Amino acid sequence: MSITDIRQAVLTGDAEGAADLSRAELKAGTAPAVIMNDALISAMDEAGARMATGELFIPEVLVASEAMRAAMDVITPHLEVEATGGRGTVVIGAVEGDVHDIGKSLVALMLDGAGFTVHDLGVDVATAAFVAAAKEQDADIVAMSSLMVTTMPKMKVVIEALREAGLETKPIVGGAPITQAFADKIRAAGYAPDAGGAVRLVRDLL
Amino acid sequence: MGDTLKLRMLSSEQVGTLREKCLDLLATMGMRIDHDGALGILAEAGADVDRETHVVKFPAELVESAIKSVPEEFVVKGADPRHDLAIPHPDGLFYTSTNVQSMLHHDVDTKRFEDNSVARYAEWCQIIEVLDHTDICAIQTPMDVPAESAEVHALNIQMQNTTKPLWMHAFSREAVPFMFELLVARMGSVEGLRTQSVAIINPGTVSPFIVKAMDAEEIIQACHHGVPISSDGHVMSGFTSPMSVAGSAVQNCAETLAHVVLCQVVKPGHPIMMTQFNCPGDMATGFSTLATPIANVQRAVGQQLTSEGFAIRVSGCPIMTDTYVSDGRAVAEKALGALLCALAGIDIAYGVGRLGGASLASPAQLIIDDQIVAVVKEYVRGIQVNDEFLAIDEILASGIGGSLVRSKHTLKHCRDYVEPSLFRFQLQQQWEAEGEKDLYERAVDEYRRLKPMIKPVDLPDDVRREMDAVVARADKALCP
């Protein structure tokens, strides 16, 4: 057993294997933070990179993230408190008036799989709810999705509300009608065209 | 289309199986319908309605009763009756619609995607007015109007620039009443609109199994105002519906059947079609794909299920591509999709003018697609076999080693099929002399040729003023 084996178990979506190997690695004296960073997060980073090239498909990355989570459940009780925050905290939701869920949920799953702590507010999320969640969770990132022209303006409203509340959280945007130009115009910290891109963006911003 | 020229993807037994599964899904799982009024209407009609969760389960007998009351023939009307569309097509062919929503248009001069605008969209509608094989003008999104009332502005632009039937839908529930107010303003009164309905409205579902308040409102208002409906299911196989063709087809039909039931309960006999807007998810990016073979196979299966299983008229979206340029891939994808779905039997084929991505549009592609449709129609038109077309007398008269080029039969039929201009046969020398242009370049030439000839609709001043006043009211009510 080794870090490499745990990493491979995650990449192949073997949840039971990843959990068992992690348990054994802990027993062998390996620090839990080492397992988390060198095996689990590293595996998901590679899964994300392979998804960006088309080598892995979304369902395969999702099953890898489930394996990662199974292993995390084993090592989390052994982690130092400050290490359990993962790589950062993200609040995500579809803006007010927008009930399209699938893309936003996919981004949430991918971010979770990549080791971020994700709070998914769902769909039709009011501006005040974004701000409240960002405060409560001390969010590093607020991720907003919109799939309709009529709801796109809400993104700017949320960004301004976050600024007025004095929060340092970084707002990012995505959704089929969203473009980089639009994101720049509303002063978002970033834009991602798809779920894989969202993970890379959050990683880069943090 | 000839009686023998029909592609059946499913056997009759399979149609029966899928049909049964549609009804099972509606009866056991149901739909969530986020519209209080619709919930009340359906509860009164015998549906099992949970007011807390908004989930409606549809007993089979309610669904069957609704299916029976859907008219098998109706007319989709334009502001000008010359553009009315008798459904089904009297020659067994199909009608076409352009694409919705486009916020970006490919500009033939800058060669970039530029924001759609009032002026650009007006020109688009005017081009549609003069095309031979583009029958319906669909709503798009001008970006130089308030986003909150964009669809009301867009509908106004449509009606001021084309008299062909309009494919319309709202982007928010709050805009729905203003859109119908606008239609009434155009036609003078609600009765006027009921007589000449001007549009076909396109409510959708949010897969899996959700009907938004906006879409339920569209159905109710369309029934009241006499506007036909084409109900979209938006399944995305692998993400919101099963990966499999059969599973996605069943789910898409089940979802749109819920719209059919609501429609027929509100107004029995109101014209409604079911649309196959299946867009399989791309497994690498999570985005919808528009023109993959599997997308069109799903649509063709859904079309057959709709027409044979439910005897309901069907629309679909086969004139699609996943590329961002007007190239050979666009032509291949659009032609193959259109041909497959035409052979499978479609009443309205959507997508003329659309490129890939989040609904990009292109005036050059609009012109190309109009002519692709002309070509596809020739494949599915069917042939006639009778004395005239057997022409045995001609054969005998010409004799062994003879020529028919000067025969009366050839003279009479030499224009039965004339290739559309972009697909015109040319000798190589002729092509070289004309600049060795490719399809896109010739489409741009055609666009430039049409441009000086197109114009807005000549509306009476008082009608135009009333329409503009509706838009102003929408702006005031919808924009912060």
Image (cartoon, coloured by chain):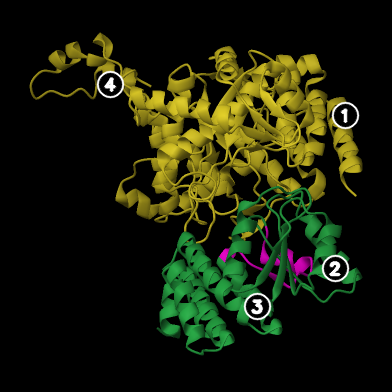
Chain colours: A green, B yellow
Range drawn in magenta: A178-195
C-alpha distance separating marks 4 and 1: 54 Å
Depicted B401 relative to depicted B478: above or below: above
Q: Position of residue B146 (x, y in %)?
A: 82, 49
Instruction: Name the residue beneath numbered marker 2.
Output: A162
- Vertical relation: B81 (above or below) A91: above
Task: Write down the chain letter for disc 4.
Answer: B
Mark 2 and mark 3 lie on one chain; the one further toward the N terminus is 3
User: Which amino acid does the dot numbered 3 rest on?
Assistant: Gly
Count of marks, rendered view = 4
| Residue B104 seen in the figure | yes
Disc 4 with disc 1 on a shared chain: yes
Q: Give the residue type that dot 1 points to.
A: Glu
Q: Report the Cα–Cα distance between label 1 and label 2.
A: 41 Å
Q: Chain of mark 2?
A: A
Q: Which residue is mark 4?
A: B410
How many C-alpha atoms fall within 10 Å of the one at disc 3: few (<14), some, or many (≥20)?
A: some
Q: Residue at x 67, y 71 (%)?
A: A117
What is the distance, in whole Å, between disc 2 and disc 4 at their CAs? 76 Å
Determine whether label 2 and label 4 are within 8 Å by CB.
no
